[in-house]
Image (tube, coloured by chain):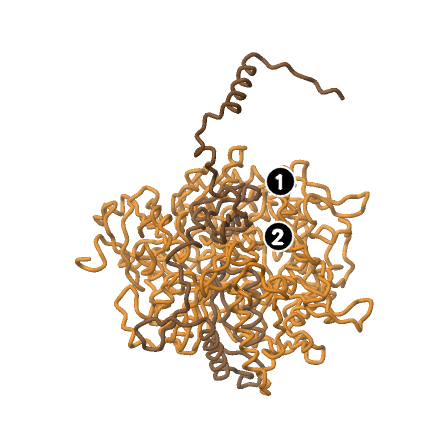
Chain colours: A orange, B brown
C-alpha cells in the first residue's frame, strides 16, 4: 500500500516477484493500477487518502474475532496495559482525543494518554483484558466503527475484496508464517501520513509480524541516501541518531534538563547521556567541558516548526536572507512550487550546488510565466557539483545499510564534492571569526574542524579535498583519553577507534558524532561500509546496517517468550541455553546475555527495567505500542480524517480533517477547495515513473531517459475522458485553487472511477517530474499541490488533493 | 583416491572433436581476433547507484582517466548486476555535455550570468554567511531563554548527498553557526 514498488523500486521488486513464484501472495492496494498491480495476485483499487479506514477495519476484525497472534501480542505488545481513566477516545469526543486545545489547534495536554502506574512507576496491566481502561478494550471501542460497510462507503472497495485481503493476512500469521507491508511516499505525503503508517504497525503487531524474517514494515525510501540524511541528520528537529534538536519551547535550557526531557530512565534510551555528551565532544572538542555543559548552550534551540515548507513561508515574509540548496530543487520539486519560486525572489542571496542548471537556479529569468529579472533582487551563486562517481563516501540505503562508493575520476572543471564545499566554507568562516571576542561566535571558534588530508590524493588534480575517512571516524567515535593512562590524550587523527556504541560513555572521554553509526569504522583500515563479501544468509559482510550491523530490528521477537524460535521455518535469533546467550543468523537486538525469564525488579532503571521477553528495547517499557501513550501529535490511535481537500464529507466523525494538521489558513496563496466543491470535484494523486527522478535534475538532462519518457502526461479513466471530451493523446488542463498546468492525456483503465458514499468519484494520476529547464520540459505538477502539513513531521499532502480537468492547452494558440 | 575416468559417449566425442577443430584452425580474421570489449583492461571502481534507495551496486569502468561505462555489479546481493532504466543511465548522468563546470554568478537585479572563479565565489559566500549571521543572530528571547540561533539562513539538501557530507553540514551550520532550518529531501 502507498507504493508502486515495481516502477519506483524495480530491482527490489524482483524479490517480490521471486517470492510470488515460490507461493507468496502479493496484494497491491493503490488508487493507480501499475506494473505492481499487474504482477500482484490481487489488485485493490482504493480512493486516495482512505487507507486508515481500510486498515482500521482489518484491526477491528482481528480484535473482534480474536484472530490476532495471541502469544506474540500478549507478551510483546502493550495490549494489557491500563491507560489513565481521564483518557477520552474519539468515540466519546466525535473525532477528537482528550487534551485538544481549540485555541492552538494542538493536543497541548497529552497527559491523559499515558499509562496508569503504581507508586514505584510500574505500569499497571490487566492480562485478562477485561478492564475497560486496558488498551485492548479501548481499541475495541475505537475501531468498532471501522467496518466492512465503511470500507465500501469510504474507500470504494467491496467488502468481498477487502475480506480476501483479511483472510490472506490471517493465513500468513502465526508461528509458521509472516507477512510484510511495503509502503513509500504514497503513505507519508498525507495530512495524516504518520497515522497511516501507525495503522500498519498496529496491524503487523497484532499479526506477530515485527522483528521476524519475512515480516516488518518496509519503508521504501526514494533516494540513494535519504535514510542517511535522516540518520545523521540534516533535519531541523533532530540531532545525530534520533536525539531531538533542543527546543526553547521545552524546559531544555541546560544539558541536565535536556537529558531529563529527551532521554528515558528505562530501556535503551537510558544511554542518552552518553550519546549526547559524545556528540558534543565530537563537535566542540576541548572546549566542551563539564563546567560549560559540554558546550550544550551553543547548540541552537528551535522555537517552533522550522521545516522546509514553514521556512518557505518565513522566506515569503522576508525573514530568511540567505539560502543554500545542495542538490535540491524546490522551484519544481516542492509542493506549491509557484509559491516556492516566489519565496526565492525574497532572498538576499542563495547558493545552489548542482550538476545542471536546475529551475531553482534560474527562477530569476525563467519560469512558467514570463519573468522580469530587473525586479528580482536575489543574488545567486551557482556552483558545479561532483557526481556520485567523482567522490568517495557512503550512502545509507532503505535497509539502513551503509554502502561505500569508491572514487572513479575527478569531477570536471571547478566541480567539487559537497564535502569539499562545506569543509572549505567552514575553514573560511573560522578564519573570519578567528579574532572575535563576541560570545555568540564561540561555537564556530570552538568547532573542531581538521579534516585536512595528510597527503594529496594520488592521481588527482584536486589537492585540497578533505579526508573523508576522518569524517567517517568522527561519526564512528574515537577515544579522547586513554583508559589506562588518563594523562594520554588523543586527537581525531591519532585516536583509537571506538568499536561500537556500547563503548560510549557519559564522562566526556569519547567523541562520537553519530552513535547509531558507531561500529562502522571500528579500527584503522576496516571501513565496514566498504565490506563487499556477498556470502551468507543475512549478508553480514556486505555493507554495514546500523545499529551494530543488525539486518532485522527488534529480532528478539523472532523467538517466542521462552527464547525458542517460533518455528523451524521462521528461525532467526534465539536463546542458546547451553551458552547462556542470544545467538542466530543476525546480530541479536537484545542484551546478549539477558535470559528470556529475566523479570525486572520493581523500580529498576536503565536496561535492567527491560524483561527477558520484552523485545522492543527502544521503548521505555520494552513493548510494541499498539496504543502510543506519548510521542505523537495527533493522537494515540489512528483515526480516519478526510484529506485537507476532499470530494466527500467524513462519514466516520463530524471532524472532517486532521484537527492538528498545519493548515496555514491565513496564507493568501495556499487556497484550499472546500469539501465537495463542484469546481474541483476530481481527486488527484501523484507518482513517480521508472525513467525519471523527482523533479528531474538527475534525469531530464539525459537523452536516454527522455527518449523513454518524453513528456508530462495525466492518466484518467475513459469514463472521465468521455464526460469531459478529452481525447487520448490530446491535451488537457488540470486546475486547482493554486494553479493550472497542461499535460498530455493518457486515457486508461488504470484509473478507475470509484463509488464512494453513494456517488462516483473520479481520480486522476499525475507524475511530477517536469519543469521548465532541462532537455525535456513540461508542466510542474507541484504547482497544483497545497501546503497543508502533517502535524508530526510537517510533510505535505501531495498524494490526495482535488482538482478539475478540461480539454485543450493552457494558453490559446500554444 | 583414484580419479574415475568416464568414457565419452559418441555424441560427446563428436562435440569434443568439433571444439578442437575450432581451437586449432581459428576461422577468424586478424581483425576479429584483435577485437575486445571496450571495458577490457579498464579499471573497475565499485560504486552505488545514485537514484532510489534500494542501493544497487555499480561497476564504474575507467580508462585513461575517463569513465567509459557504468554497469550493475554482479557481486552485489542487492541487484546481482541488474539495473533499472535510471540506474542504467548513470553513465549519462555523470558524463554529459550539459553539466556545469564553472561557477556562475548572478548579481542582484542583473539579467545575466557571469562566470566567476571558485575561489572568488567561496570567499563571497563566506562573507555573505557572516554578514547575515551577524545581523540576524539571537542569543536570547525577550523573556531571557537562551536560543543562540539564526533564522536568517536556511539550508535544503538533496538525498544524493553522502552521509559524511550531511554530517559536516549539520555540524557546521547547526553546531558552528546556529542555523536552525537545516532541511533535506528526507522531509519531502
Question: Residue A781: horizontal and vertical position, in percent?
Answer: 34, 58
Badge 2 marks a residue whose secondary structure is helix
Q: CA distance from mark 2 to mark 1?
A: 37 Å
Q: Quadrant of residue A504?
A: bottom right
Residue at far left of view: A813
* Residue in the foreground of this view, choosing between A127 and A31: A31
Check chain identity for marks 2 and 1: say if they share one: yes
Image quarter where the C terminus of chain A lies is bottom left
Badge 1 marks a residue whose secondary structure is loop
* Residue in the foreground of this view, choosing between A63 and A331: A331
Left or right: where does residue A550 sit relative to residue A144?
Answer: right
Q: Is residue A660 visible?
A: no
Please report whichever mark, 2 or 1, sits nearer to the chain's N-terminal start.
1
Q: Is residue A246 visible?
A: yes
Question: Residue A226: horizontal and vertical position, in percent?
Answer: 51, 58
Instruction: Identify the residue shown where x is 49% and y is 39%.
Output: A26
User: Which one is in front in this view, the residue at disc 2 or the one at disc 1?
Assistant: 2
Instruction: Give the residue pinned by disc 1.
Output: A174
Q: Quadrant of residue A734?
A: bottom left
Left or right: where does residue A97 sit relative to residue A363?
Answer: right
Residue at far bottom of view: A437
Q: Label 2 crowding class (10 Å Cα cut-off): few <14, some 14-19, many 20+?
A: many
Q: Label 1 crowding class (10 Å Cα cut-off): few <14, some 14-19, many 20+?
A: many
Name the subunit of mark 2: A
Left or right: where does residue B10 sit relative to residue B97?
Answer: right
Query: Does residue A38 lie above or below B91 as drawn?
Result: above
Question: Residue B24: horizontal and vertical position, in percent?
Answer: 53, 23
Instruction: Give the residue pinned by disc 2.
Output: A530
Question: Residue A493: horizontal and vertical position, in percent?
Answer: 68, 67
Name the subunit of mark 1: A
Left or right: where does residue B111 sit relative to residue A239?
Answer: left
Query: Does residue B35 lie above or below A734 as drawn?
Result: above
Amino acid at each position: 500500500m502507498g507504493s508502486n514498488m515495481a516502477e519506483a523500486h524495480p530491482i527490489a521488486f524482483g524479490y517480490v516477484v521471486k517470492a510470488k513464484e515460490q507461493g507468496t501472495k502479493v496484494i497491491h492496494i493503490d488508487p493507480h493500477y501499475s506494473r505492481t498491480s499487474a504482477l500482484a495476485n490481487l489488485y485493490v483499487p482504493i480512493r486516495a487518502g482512505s487507507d486508515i479506514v481500510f486498515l482500521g477495519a482489518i484491526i477491528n476484525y482481528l480484535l473482534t474475532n480474536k484472530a490476532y497472534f495471541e502469544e506474540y501480542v500478549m507478551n510483546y505488545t502493550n495490549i494489557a496495559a491500563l491507560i489513565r481513566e481521564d483518557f477520552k477516545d474519539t468515540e466519546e469526543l466525535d473525532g477528537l482525543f482528550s487534551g485538544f486545545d481549540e485555541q492552538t489547534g494542538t493536543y497541548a495536554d497529552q497527559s491523559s494518554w499515558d499509562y496508569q502506574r503504581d507508586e514505584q512507576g510500574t505500569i499497571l496491566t490487566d492480562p485478562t483484558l477485561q478492564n475497560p481502561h486496558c488498551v485492548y478494550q479501548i481499541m475495541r471501542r475505537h475501531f468498532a466503527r471501522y467496518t466492512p460497510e465503511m470500507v465500501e462507503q469510504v474507500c470504494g472497495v467491496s467488502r468481498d475484496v477487502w475480506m480476501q485481503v483479511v483472510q490472506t493476512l490471517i493465513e500468513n500469521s502465526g508461528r509458521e508464517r509472516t507477512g510484510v507491508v511495503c509502503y513509500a511516499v504514497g503513505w507519508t505525503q498525507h495530512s495524516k501520513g504518520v497515522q497511516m503508517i501507525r495503522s500498519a504497525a498496529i496491524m503487523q503487531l497484532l499479526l506477530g509480524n515485527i522483528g521476524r524474517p519475512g515480516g516488518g514494515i518496509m519503508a521504501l525510501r526514494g533516494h540513494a541516501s535519504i535514510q542517511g540524511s535522516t540518520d545523521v541528520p540534516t533535519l531541523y528537529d533532530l540531532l545525530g541518531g534520533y536525539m531531538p534538536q533542543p527546543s526553547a519551547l521545552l524546559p531544555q535550557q541546560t544539558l541536565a534538563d535536556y537529558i531529563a526531557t529527551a532521554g528515558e530512565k528505562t530501556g535503551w534510551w537510558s544511554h542518552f547521556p552518553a550519546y549526547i555528551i559524545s556528540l558534543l565532544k565530537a563537535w566542540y572538542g576541548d572546549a566542551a567541558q563539564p563546567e560549560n555543559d559540554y558546550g550544550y548552550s551553543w547548540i541552537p534551540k528551535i522555537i517552533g516548526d522550522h521545516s522546509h515548507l514553514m521556512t518557505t513561508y518565513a522566506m515569503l515574509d522576508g525573514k530568511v536572507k540567505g539560502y543554500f540548496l545542495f542538490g535540491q530543487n524546490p522551484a519544481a520539486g516542492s509542493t506549491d512550487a509557484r509559491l516556492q519560486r516566489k519565496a526565492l525572489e525574497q532572498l538576499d542571496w542563495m547558493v545552489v550546488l548542482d550538476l545542471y542548471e536546475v529551475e531553482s537556479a534560474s527562477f530569476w529569468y525563467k519560469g512558467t510565466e514570463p519573468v522580469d529579472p530587473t525586479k528580482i533582487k536575489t543574488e545567486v551563486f551557482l556552483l558545479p557539483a561532483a557526481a556520485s562517481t567523482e567522490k568517495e563516501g557512503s550512502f545509507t540505503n532503505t535497509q539502513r545499510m551503509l554502502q561505500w562508493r569508491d572514487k572513479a575520476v575527478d569531477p570536471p572543471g571547478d566541480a567539487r564534492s559537497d564535502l569539499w564545499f562545506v569543509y572549505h566554507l567552514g575553514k573560511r568562516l573560522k578564519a573570519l571569526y578567528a579574532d572575535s571576542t563576541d560570545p555568540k561566535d564561540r561555537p564556530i571558534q570552538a568547532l573542531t574542524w581538521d579534516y585536512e588530508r595528510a597527503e594529496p590524493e594520488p592521481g588527482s588534480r584536486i589537492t585540497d579535498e578533505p579526508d573523508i575517512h576522518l569524517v567517517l571516524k568522527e561519526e564512528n567515535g574515537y577515544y579522547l583519553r586513554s583508559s589506562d593512562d588518563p594523562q594520554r590524550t588523543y586527537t581525531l587523527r591519532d585516536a583509537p577507534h571506538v568499536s561500537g556504541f556500547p563503548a560510549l560513555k557519559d564522562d566526556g572521554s569519547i567523541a562520537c558524532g553519530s552513535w547509531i553509526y558507531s561500529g562502522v569504522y571500528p579500527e584503522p583500515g576496516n571501513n565496514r561500509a566498504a565490506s563487499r563479501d556477498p556470502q551468507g544468509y543475512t549478508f553480514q559482510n556486505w555493507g554495514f546496517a546500523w545499529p551494530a550491523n543488525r539486518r532485522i530490528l527488534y529480532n528478539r521477537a523472532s523467538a517466542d517468550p521462552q527464547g525458542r524460535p517460533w518455528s523451524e521455518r521462521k528461525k532467526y535469533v534465539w536463546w542458546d541455553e547451553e551458552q547462556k546467550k542470544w545467538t542466530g543468523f543476525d546480530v541479536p537486538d537484545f542484551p546478549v546475555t539477558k535470559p528470556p525469564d529475566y523479570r525486572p525488579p520493581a523500580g529498576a532503571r536503565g536496561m535492567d527495567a527491560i524483561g527477558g521477553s520484552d523485545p522492543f528495547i527502544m521503548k521505555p517499557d520494552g513493548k510494541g505500542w499498539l496504543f502510543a501513550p506519548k510521542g505523537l501529535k495527533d493522537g494515540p490511535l489512528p483515526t480516519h480524517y478526510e484529506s485537507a481537500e476532499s470530494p466527500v464529507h467524513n462519514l466516520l466523525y463530524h471532524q472532517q480533517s486532521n484537527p492538528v494538521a498545519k493548515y496555514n489558513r491565513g496564507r493568501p496563496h495556499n487556497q484550499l477547495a472546500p469539501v465537495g466543491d463542484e469546481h474541483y470535484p476530481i481527486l488527484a494523486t501523484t507518482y513517480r515513473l521508472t525513467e525519471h527522478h523527482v523533479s528531474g535534475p538527475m534525469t531530464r538532462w539525459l537523452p536516454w531517459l527522455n527518449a523513454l519518457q518524453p513528456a508530462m502526461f495525466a492518466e484518467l479513466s475513459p469514463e472521465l475522458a468521455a464526460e469531459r471530451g478529452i481525447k487520448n493523446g490530446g491535451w488537457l488542463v488540470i486546475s486547482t485553487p493554486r494553479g493550472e498546468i497542461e499535460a498530455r492525456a493518457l486515457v486508461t483503465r488504470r484509473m478507475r472511477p470509484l463509488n464512494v458514499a453513494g456517488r462516483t468519484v473520479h481520480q486522476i494520476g499525475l507524475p511530477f517530474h517536469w519543469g521548465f529547464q532541462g532537455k525535456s520540459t513540461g508542466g510542474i505538477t507541484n504547482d497544483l499541490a497545497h501546503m497543508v502539513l502533517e502535524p508530526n513531521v510537517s510533510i505535505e499532502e501531495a498524494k490526495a488533493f482535488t482538482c478539475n480537468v478540461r480539454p485543450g492547452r493552457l494558453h490559446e494558440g500554444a | 583416491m583414484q580419479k574415475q575416468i568416464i568414457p565419452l559417449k559418441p555424441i560427446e566425442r563428436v562435440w569434443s572433436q568439433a571444439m578442437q577443430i575450432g581451437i586449432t584452425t581459428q576461422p577468424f580474421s586478424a581483425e576479429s581476433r584483435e577485437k575486445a570489449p571496450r571495458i577490457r583492461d579498464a579499471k573497475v571502481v565499485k560504486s552505488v547507484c545514485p537514484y532510489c534507495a534500494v542501493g544497487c551496486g555499480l561497476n564504474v569502468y575507467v580508462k585513461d582517466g575517463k569513465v567509459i561505462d557504468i554497469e550493475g555489479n554482479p557481486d552485489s546481493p542487492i541487484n546481482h548486476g541488474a539495473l533499472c532504466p535510471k540506474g542504467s543511465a548513470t553513465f549519462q548522468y555523470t558524463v554529459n555535455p550539459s553539466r556545469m563546470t564553472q561557477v556562475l554568478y548572478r548579481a542582484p537585479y542583473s539579467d545575466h550570468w557571469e562566470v566567476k572563479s571558485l575561489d572568488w565565489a567561496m570567499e563571497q559566500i563566506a562573507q555573505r554567511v557572516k554578514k547575515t549571521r551577524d545581523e540576524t543572530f539571537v542569543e536570547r528571547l525577550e523573556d531571557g531563554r537562551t536560543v543562540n540561533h539564526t533564522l536568517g539562513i536556511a539550508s535544503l539538501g538533496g538525498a544524493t548527498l553522502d552521509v559524511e557530507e550531511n554530517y559536516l553540514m549539520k555540524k557546521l551550520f547547526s553546531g558552528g553557526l546556529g542555523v536552525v532550518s537545516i532541511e533535506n529531501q528526507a522531509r519531502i
